[in-house]
Image (cartoon, rainbow, N blue to C red):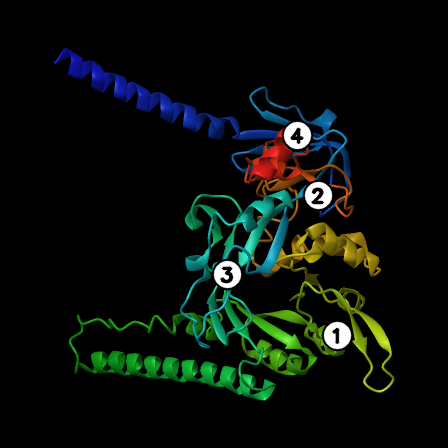
């Protein structure tokens, strides 16, 4: 008996100690001070030699080092000589998903959260690039592609990563097995079918209530029928309870997209070939999401002369707010490349920064939580070694909601890839 009691007591004590040790890092990060950096708040002037204090996941103080007393229990991140800015926000992405498109055209009932892989290298790369918020949504190759989800690129499960589970429904005007007009007709028909279903549902419900008032139906009886779950996302879209994300592949589809925008709450996700419709987009006065291809050459069919089209610059000159997208590979998959491309086109730095911070946050309805460093907002920030638009700058540290989630010095995969020692070379050769 004594032996059994000792075993139980030892097991219980071990479990207690393990739980205490596991909880210790979380408690230690309840209070974080990022001290001494050049802080880009994205809503005001740049603060030199400043401190950002984060408590319980939110920014509580921000200002010059001399004006902010750092509590003794705070975890201090030294940002001296470095740049501190909010983490980037991606307004539209298929990264980290196992299959961005379904084979059927009309799959409004699916959710991309079911296809997300928290262990995907994409989310690791997000942290290395200073990305703190990702709107993952189905691709452009379906008519009604399903619902998206907003996640942070950190967590063991999709539920852990989730920031907002109701980000909106994906629609597309990209022709699928037919021409442009056929795709428009298909989309119109799908929306009209949903309207007819909704009208019929409301009619039958009204008739039920009328019969109940007249005494033909027992007053205690309740209307129990619910919307068809496969149609609910589209019905929510029609009633403007959710936002639609409409892919517009080219200039020819912009007029139809704008007509739909007068009926529904839509964000236009533009393909690269939309430069001829800038005047129409300007009249709409809505922020848009740009394709990752920010510049390309167009050949005149008669003269064969090539002209470089700078899409981001055209929109900026027209006063159209835009959010930047990242490619799945190559240079356009890096935020600094996209930012630098904007500046190279003649766009001012503040507009470029906004395209990866405040504009996408506004499109996602998270502007009160993300994208700027202000008291009361979530403590999402990155510490970088220099100018964010320089190729030689790298992300050193990422903090999400007051939790230290990435340190370059502890990035094992990066260490392995960059290891040039004889041991590393031998290990690489042996594999």
In whole angstroms, how far apart are the C-alphas of marks 2 and 1? 32 Å
Q: Nearer the viewer, mark 2 or mark 4?
A: 4
Q: Is 246 placed left or right of 307 in the picture?
A: left
Q: Which residue is mark 1?
A: 275
Q: Which residue is mark 4?
A: 422
Give whichever of 355, 15 is nearer the camera. Answer: 15
Q: Nearer the viewer, mark 3 or mark 1?
A: 1
Picture coordinates of residue 151, whole percent (x, y): 51, 51
Label number found at residue 41: 2
* Mark 1 neighbour class, 10 Å CA radius: few under 14, some 14 to 19, many 20 or more: some
Mark 4 and mark 1 lie on one chain; the one further toward the N terminus is 1
Q: Nearer the viewer, mark 2 or mark 1?
A: 1
In whole angstroms, how far apart are the C-alphas of marks 3 and 1? 27 Å
Q: Is the residue 112 above or below the residue 419 in the image?
A: below
Q: Is 145 placed left or right of 248 in the picture?
A: left
Q: Is residue 127 visible?
A: yes
* Mark 2 neighbour class, 10 Å CA radius: few under 14, some 14 to 19, many 20 or more: some
Mark 3 and mark 1 lie on one chain; the one further toward the N terminus is 3
Q: Which residue is mark 3?
A: 167
Q: Nearer the viewer, mark 3 or mark 4?
A: 4
Circle count: 4
Q: Residue at x 81, y 67 (%)?
A: 317
State yes or no: discs 2 and 1 in contact (Cβ < 8 Å): no
Q: Residue at x 62, y 26 (%)?
A: 76
Mark 3 and mark 4 lie on one chain; the one further toward the N terminus is 3
Q: Is residue 406 visible?
A: no
The extreme top residue here reads: 2
The image quadrant where one finds the C terminus is top right
In whole angstroms, how far apart are the C-alphas of marks 4 and 1? 52 Å
Give whichever of 269, 428 is nearer the camera. Answer: 428
Q: Determine whether the residue tagged by mark 1 lies in a helix, strand or loop.
A: helix
């Amino acid at each position: 008996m004594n032996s059994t009691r000792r075993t139980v007591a030892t097991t219980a004590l071990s479990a207690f100690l393990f739980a205490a040790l596991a909880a210790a890092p979380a408690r230690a990060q309840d209070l974080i001070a990022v001290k001494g950096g050049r802080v880009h708040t994205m809503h005001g002037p740049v603060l030199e030699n400043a401190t950002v204090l984060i408590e319980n996941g939110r920014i509580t103080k921000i200002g010059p080092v001399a004006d902010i007393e750092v509590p003794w229990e705070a975890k201090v991140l030294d940002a001296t000589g470095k740049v501190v800015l909010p983490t980037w926000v991606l307004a539209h992405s298929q990264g980290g998903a196992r299959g961005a498109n379904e084979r059927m055209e009309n799959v409004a009932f699916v959710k991309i959260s079911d296809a997300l892989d928290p262990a995907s290298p994409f989310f690791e790369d997000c942290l290395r690039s200073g990305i703190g918020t990702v709107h993952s949504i189905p691709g452009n190759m379906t008519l009604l592609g399903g619902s998206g989800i907003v996640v942070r690129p950190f967590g063991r499960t999709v539920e852990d990563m989730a920031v907002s589970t109701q980000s909106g429904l994906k629609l597309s005007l990209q022709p699928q097995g037919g021409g442009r007009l056929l795709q428009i007709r298909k989309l119109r028909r799908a929306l009209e079918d949903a309207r007819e279903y909704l009208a019929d549902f409301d009619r039958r419900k009204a008739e039920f209530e009328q019969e109940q008032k007249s005494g033909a139906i027992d007053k205690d009886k309740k209307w129990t029928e619910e919307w068809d779950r496969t149609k609910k996302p589209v019905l929510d879209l029609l009633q403007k309870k959710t936002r639609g994300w409409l892919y517009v592949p080219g200039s020819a589809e912009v007029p139809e997209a704008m007509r739909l925008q007068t009926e529904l709450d839509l964000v236009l996700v533009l393909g690269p070939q939309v430069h001829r419709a800038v005047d129409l987009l300007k009249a709409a006065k809505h922020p848009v999401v740009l394709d990752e291809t920010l510049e390309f050459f167009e050949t005149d069919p008669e003269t064969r002369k090539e002209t470089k089209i700078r899409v981001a610059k055209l929109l900026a000159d027209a006063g159209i707010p835009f959010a930047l997208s990242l490619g799945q590979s190559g240079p356009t998959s890096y935020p600094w490349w996209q930012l630098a491309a904007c500046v190279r086109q003649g766009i001012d730095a503040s507009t470029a920064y906004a395209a990866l911070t405040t504009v996408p946050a506004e499109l996602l309805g998270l502007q009160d939580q993300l994208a700027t460093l202000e008291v009361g907002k979530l403590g999402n920030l990155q510490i970088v070694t220099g100018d964010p638009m320089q190729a030689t700058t790298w992300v050193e540290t990422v903090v999400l909601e007051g939790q230290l989630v990435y340190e370059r010095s502890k990035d094992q995969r990066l260490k392995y890839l960059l290891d040039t020692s004889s041991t590393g070379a031998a290990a690489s050769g042996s594999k």
